[in-house]
Image: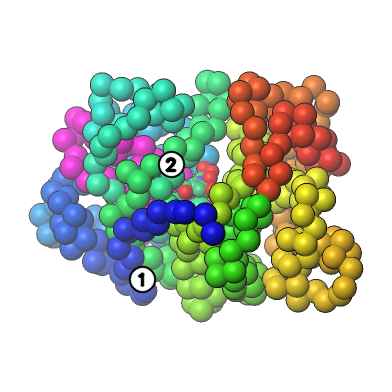
């Protein structure tokens, strides 16, 4: 087991009607003037924003609202939020919605605490942020795990770059998680969320270091998400299924499922370029490339893929390579069952692309030839290109 630090400080308030405790927790973490950050309007239509606003107003917390965070939220929008937070003198940023709203809230919290530095300099690692306003999250979709993660992902539409910033400053002080708030989700978004939760675990599980406890936790989480995902994509009003998915979403991305290993995260990096170029939903960007990545890296350590097949999919056998292939096949079939695309051709936002586009994607994914991605197998620009090529069917 490699050495690690593990910090997961977010206070989780889980269960029915927990959104009514929002004021108590904003106050607990020092908020007296809260900026409420939300997305394209689902929380307005569901009445959640009004409810939260009501409890905050009642308890004397001053509020300003900032909507419009779109899936794959933009730098430009976050900058606008920073200006608003500064003008309002916000001392607390509350994200209400999914990863896009919560990531925008986190970005505003860093930007408002460091007004002299442009946000993007932090996301491009030119500058290191030393402070942030406190944030909280009221989650409406089990997916990105942003409610407890240390990460915030923004897209600069001017350059077509999607970048994540990982820092403990991004850990929300609290996360309110009421599974009933997910009942209004379109089934496609449920499927995207299930895919992303799986992928946060898979992108850690496939790494060069074996760790029995961490691996067993990851496998249990995957089995649960696969089973509950099957129920949720038919009925997003199933409280038990949505509860399990919601909690799995947090656990899959707060660090727990990768402790003691270096992680991999190549699939996330491959997917981010697809979202940046084609605007495809995050979950769909990952399923689009996963099996092409898996087939490319499996020869590094087929025993790992065989273990995955056995412990997650219940596949038996003695031939390691055959089991590994069966595990990859089972994952691909499951994504299809969810209605997720498993290649470029099946992804409505992408479609079959020219070789020039594949080269450009690989160039961008290697950050203009300045980095490799992955640890299970380290991938350079050429390896990345070959994976996109394999997925281009
Ligand atoms: O914008 P609104 O109107 O709220 O609608 C959203 C959006 O259209 C809708 N939605 C969410 N909850 C709903 C609902 N519709 C009806 N009822 C509800 N209860 O679902 C759509 C997707 O929402 P979004 O917030 O984009 O989803 P998700 O949570 O998947 O977040 C995706 C973003 O998070 C980033 C992704 O890259 C992407 O930008 N990620 C953030 C991470 C992190 N901070 O740790 C890690 C992830 O790997 C990921 O990269
Ligand atoms: Zn993700």
Magenta segment includes 164: no
Location of residue 116 in the rendering, given as x and y in whole percent from the top left corner: 26, 21
Q: Residue 22 carries which label?
A: none
Q: Residue at x 83, y 76 (%)?
A: 316
Q: How far apart are marks 1 and 2 (CA)?
A: 25 Å
Q: Can you name the residue that lies furthest to the left here? A: 60
Characterize the magenta stretch by its predominant secondary structure. Answer: helix
- Number of labels in the image equals 2
**In the displayed structure, would residue 172 be above or below residue 319?**
above
Q: Where are the magenta residues, as a range?
A: 84-110
Q: Determine whether the residue tagged by mark 1 lies in a helix, strand or loop.
A: strand
Whether residue 234 is visible to the viewer of this picture, yes or no, is no
Whether residue 202 is visible to the viewer of this picture, yes or no, is yes
Location of residue 226 in the rendering, given as x and y in whole percent from the top left corner: 65, 69
Query: Where does the N terminus fall, quadrant-wise?
Result: bottom right
- Residue at the spot of label 2: 166
- Residue at the spot of label 1: 14
Tell me if mark 2 has few (under 14), some (14-19) or many (20+) residues whose alpha carbon lies within 10 angstroms of its own.
Answer: some
Location of residue 80 in the rendering, given as x and y in whole percent from the top left corner: 34, 29
Taking the image as shown, residue 255 lies to the left or right of residue 294, namely: left
* Mark 1 or 2, closer to the camera: 2
């Amino acid at each position: 087991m490699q050495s690690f630090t593990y910090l997961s400080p977010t206070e989780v308030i889980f269960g029915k009607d927990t959104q009514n405790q929002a004021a108590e927790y904003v106050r607990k973490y020092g908020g007296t003037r809260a900026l409420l950050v939300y997305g394209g309007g689902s929380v307005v239509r569901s009445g959640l924003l009004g409810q939260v606003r009501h409890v905050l107003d009642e308890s004397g917390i001053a509020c300003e609202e900032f909507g419009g965070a779109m899936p794959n939220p933009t730098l430009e929008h976050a900058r606008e939020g920073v200006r608003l937070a500064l003008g309002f003198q916000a001392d607390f940023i509350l994200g209400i919605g999914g990863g896009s709203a919560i990531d925008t809230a986190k970005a505003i919290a860093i930007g408002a605490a460091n007004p002299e530095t442009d946000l993007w300099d932090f996301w491009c690692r030119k500058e290191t942020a030393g402070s942030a306003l406190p944030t909280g999250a009221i989650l409406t979709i089990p997916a990105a795990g942003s409610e407890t993660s240390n990460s915030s992902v923004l897209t600069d539409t001017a350059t077509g770059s999607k970048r994540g910033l990982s820092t403990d400053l991004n850990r929300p002080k609290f996360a309110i998680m009421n599974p009933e708030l997910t009942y209004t989700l379109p089934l496609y978004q449920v499927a995207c969320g299930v895919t992303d939760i799986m992928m946060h675990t898979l992108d850690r599980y496939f790494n060069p270091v074996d760790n029995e406890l961490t691996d067993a936790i990851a496998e249990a989480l995957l089995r649960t998400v696969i089973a509950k995902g099957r129920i949720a994509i038919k009925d997003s009003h199933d409280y038990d299924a949505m509860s399990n998915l919601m909690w799995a979403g947090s656990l899959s991305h707060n660090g727990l499922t990768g402790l003691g290993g270096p992680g991999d995260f190549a699939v996330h990096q491959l997917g981010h370029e697809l979202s940046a170029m084609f605007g495809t939903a995050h979950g769909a960007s990952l399923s689009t490339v996963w099996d092409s990545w898996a087939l490319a890296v499996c020869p590094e350590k087929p025993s790992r893929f065989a273990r995955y097949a056995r412990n997650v999919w219940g596949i038996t056998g003695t031939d390691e390579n055959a089991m590994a292939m069966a595990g990859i096949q089972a994952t691909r079939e499951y994504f299809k069952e969810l209605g997720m695309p498993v290649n470029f051709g099946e992804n409505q936002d992408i479609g079959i692309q020219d070789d020039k586009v594949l080269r450009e994607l690989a160039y961008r994914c290697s950050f203009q030839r300045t980095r490799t991605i992955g640890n299970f197998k380290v991938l350079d620009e050429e390896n990345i290109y070959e994976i996109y090529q394999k997925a281009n069917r």
